[in-house]
Image: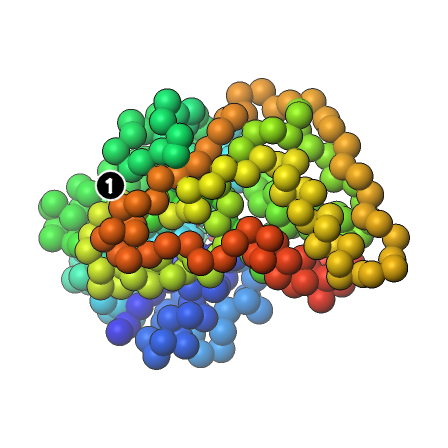
Amino acid sequence: MRVVVTGGAGFIGSHLTDRLLNEGHQVGVIDDLSSGRREQVSDQARFYEVSVASEWVGRVIARERPQVIFHLAAQIDVRKSVSDPLHDAEVNVLGTVQLLGAAARAGVARVVFMSSGGAVYGDTEVVPTPESHPLRPASPYGAAKVAGEAYLTAFATSFGLEAAVLRPGNVYGPRQDPHGEAGVVAIVSSLLLAGRAPVINGDGRQTRDYVFVDDVVEAALRLLQGPLGQYNVGTCRETAVVEVVAELSRAVSELRPGGDPPPNPRHGPAKDGEQRRSCLDCSLAASRLDWRAQVALPEGLRSTVAYFADRGPGYL
Ligand SMILES: NC(=O)c1ccc[n+]([C@@H]2O[C@H](COP(=O)([O-])OP(=O)(O)OC[C@H]3O[C@@H](n4cnc5c(N)ncnc54)[C@H](O)[C@@H]3O)[C@@H](O)[C@H]2O)c1
């Protein structure tokens, strides 16, 4: 199939691009490299350094004429969305509208939108949280994801596009940016490998649903043709930040037997308004897409640590 991946130079998008190419698809990547890396894009993909929020995106889609677009390009920093909600909306709302318009004009059959299971529900009454739970985003980032989903539905109705949505939990794995605010696994792995103590916000008992990037890519692949819908993509397991840090410390120690033990984490002040619990009910993806997360957390964390160790300290 002809496929376009927006955000294909980023963490999840580059893995998705690699997998699509491996499966024999033709892939065009759109990314403005605002946080992605050109070297993460396979040479087998056609690369367009273009913002999804610019009019150029229409020309790229008209040229590529994809059957399916995976829309992952986004400003992903929740804190930045709070300090500069207009910029967040420009990329995450207007960029999505611009892309959907281009898709409709070019007769694209299907758009798969990468929303966020961590951000669209806000604090929830039901844990694990099913897709039917009310959407009460607590950040402009989450609000933009809800808006993106709504625009997708509206374009599906108005232009006959097929619309599918993935709502992943906290995605982790190789290539995640350890410099941003997002991505506790990448940040803590890099710090521990560099012999620096990570700082845990508050008591570290806040929970998240950590899902390995390959599992998210597999869920996306199933939406190339699978049944449309909005799907949570997680493990249905709640893991506290302190547990993740402890597991990462073990992984670093195992990698360097006889070396200095990694430093103990420090506890800093709790973050105002931080969500206490987040865990996704993924039974819909299991029943309709026959998808289940395959990578257990200890295994995924070990391969992530190994990746950052290979890259050396210069990466931090
Ligand atoms: N990482 C997670 O835990 C997680 C969880 C839920 C949802 N998501 C969503 O998955 C998607 C990918 O996230 P990621 O973790 O790979 O982040 P990432 O920052 O690595 O990837 C985002 C990519 O989008 C590109 N981009 C940003 N603005 C753009 C623009 N205006 N035009 C074109 N490209 C642009 C960036 O350069 C980057 O390559 C995002 O939509 C994100 O909201 C991520």
Quick check: can you spot residue 209? yes
Q: Which residue is mark 1?
A: 151
Task: Characterize the local packing of mark 1: few (<14), some (14-19) or many (20 or more) Cα atoms within 10 angstroms.
Answer: some
User: 249 above or below 265?
Assistant: below
| Residue 138 position in % (x across, y down) | 43, 25
Q: Please indicate whether residue 93 sits to the left or right of residue 75 in the image.
A: left
Is 142 located above or below residue 180 in the figure? Answer: above
On the image, the x and y values in percent for residue 286 come to 30, 52
Q: Is residue 115 visible?
A: no
Q: Is mark 1 within 8 Å of ligand 1?
A: no
| Number of marks in picture | 1
Q: Nearer the viewer, residue 214 or 315?
A: 214
Q: Quadrant of the N terminus?
A: bottom left
Q: Position of residue 37 (x, y in %)?
A: 56, 62
* Residue sitting at x 58%, y 20%: 272
Q: Residue at x 17, y 41 (%)?
A: 154
